[in-house]
Image: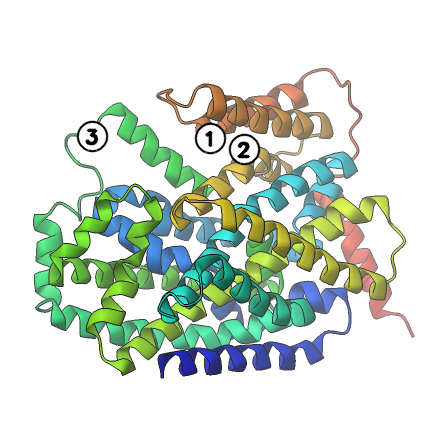
Amino acid sequence: MLISFVVFYMAVTIAIGLWAARRVHGAKDYLVAGRSLPLYMNVATVFATWFGAETVLSVSATFAKDGLHGIPGDPFGASLCLVLAALLFARLFYRMNLLTIGDFYKHRYGKGVEVLTSVAIVLSYLGWTSAQLTALGLVIHVLSGGAIDLNTAILMGAGIVVLYTMFGGMWSVAFTDLFQTVIILVGLSLVAYLVGDMAGGASKVISQAAADGKLVMFPADMDAAAWWAMASAFFAFAFGSIPQQDVFQRMTSAKDENTAVRGTVIGALIYFVFAFVPIYIAYAAVVHLPELKALFASEDAREIQRILPDLVLGKMPLWAQVLFFGALLSAILSTASGALLAPTATFTENVLRPFVPHMSDRQLLLTLRIILVTFSACALLFALNSKSTMYEMVQNAYNVTLCGAFVPLVAGAYWKRANTQGALLSVIAGIGTWLVAHNVMAEALVPANLMGLAAAVVGMLVGTLAPSVVAHKGHSIEHVLKHQAHRGGAAAHKP
């Protein structure tokens, strides 16, 4: 019966995605839904894309093991990222009328920086996308009772997401996100009530978590290494996820700039609050079945992610299983579709197109779909060979953009003197330092990603203030906005 529901749910999702694909008539529709999403859809896309498999399975299980101390990146850093992106960049991006975040680097610094930062952004999506595909495969594997092995299940799940995202782009993502948000909110809320009741009620679960020290963010016995580790995770999510195409797409898909700001902030607040629902469910599960703590001792870090699926399948009635796995599938599918579309857009528009500048809109649309399938295959290879938890995979993904794209973005938006030379040195120094520190100084007190971030800041300052060796290839923000206003006015007066 449960398998029948899953098959039906997948079929409905695909149908919605393919129906939405009828709205795609060009690259702008495919990438940013024609800039026409109303507030409620904009909120849904922000929430559903951020609320992924790692939130339901990995962050919740990490809390059950380590408490709030173990999850500074998500939901705390992740929620702050959305608020910062909305307040600092949403209006600017919308007024610049960009198709991808890579276009910002092109206008501000020229093609060289555009390609470098876009490659970093695309590579960062391998870990995030792989986390979603791994989760989708895990669900199919569990629901089949082990009849479908994990790798085959991952392949099956990837095929479903690729199918509807390839044809409908951002329109398919928007409509399926709206449907999936409803399933997530309703399904997990009811499951939380049921599991909490099984564990003795919400007050018992919360008091037990407090007694076990799980609600302490900064334990009294924290040493310097623990402080640095928390800062590393927090900065990776809070700053590293700002220069991401999926965040950019959701803001610029809104019908106007006010909607872009409000939708992103509201989506962030809903995400922050609701992220604690699976956290509550996971800890209630441990309170109800203490034997689940045995999963914490496994050598394979991914094992702790089985806490909720094992509880639901072993102890809950069918209707609760349907609600839980419906919500879980919704979380995974909504995030996976966005995670496939975002790097596809960035690579096609900002890595490939500078070398093939004269593509027609029809050729660009075909290229986007080909690149999406290609990137999906790369993410699959990553997923099939990784043994990290989804939380770890996502955090590692954001380190790439933290060190290679965040500083040039902030400097380009808010420092008029920032130039091409500074941006190039920032990207090279940031990513280079991070890679060297990660591979050579893994035991250092200061985490590799924070070394990379510091090097990126120094690189931007030194490169911009030093005598010019590399000519500045970009334009000021004022110049870009004036050019866009001129283009908009010319288009409005066309007969």
Report which residue position mark 2 lands on.
403
Tell me residue 252's x, y (percent). 62, 61
**Left or right: 110 in relation to 174:** right
Label whose residue precedes the other's in the sequence (3 or 2): 3
- Residue 441 falls in which quadrant of the image? top left
Report which residue position mark 1 lands on.
449
**Left or right: 88 in relation to 479:** left
Residue located at (60% from left, 76% from top): 17
- Front position in the image: 66 or 34: 66
Tell me residue 271's x, y (percent). 38, 61
Is disc 2 in contact with disc 1, using a CB cutoff of under 8 Å? yes
Question: Measured along the vertical axis of the image, is residue 103 above or below residue 490?
Answer: above
Instruction: Please name the amino acid that badge 1 sits on.
Output: Asn
Q: Residue furthest front?
A: 147
**Left or right: 351 in relation to 78:** right
Residue count near mark 3 (Cα–Cα under 10 Å), binned few <14, some 14–19, many ≥20: few
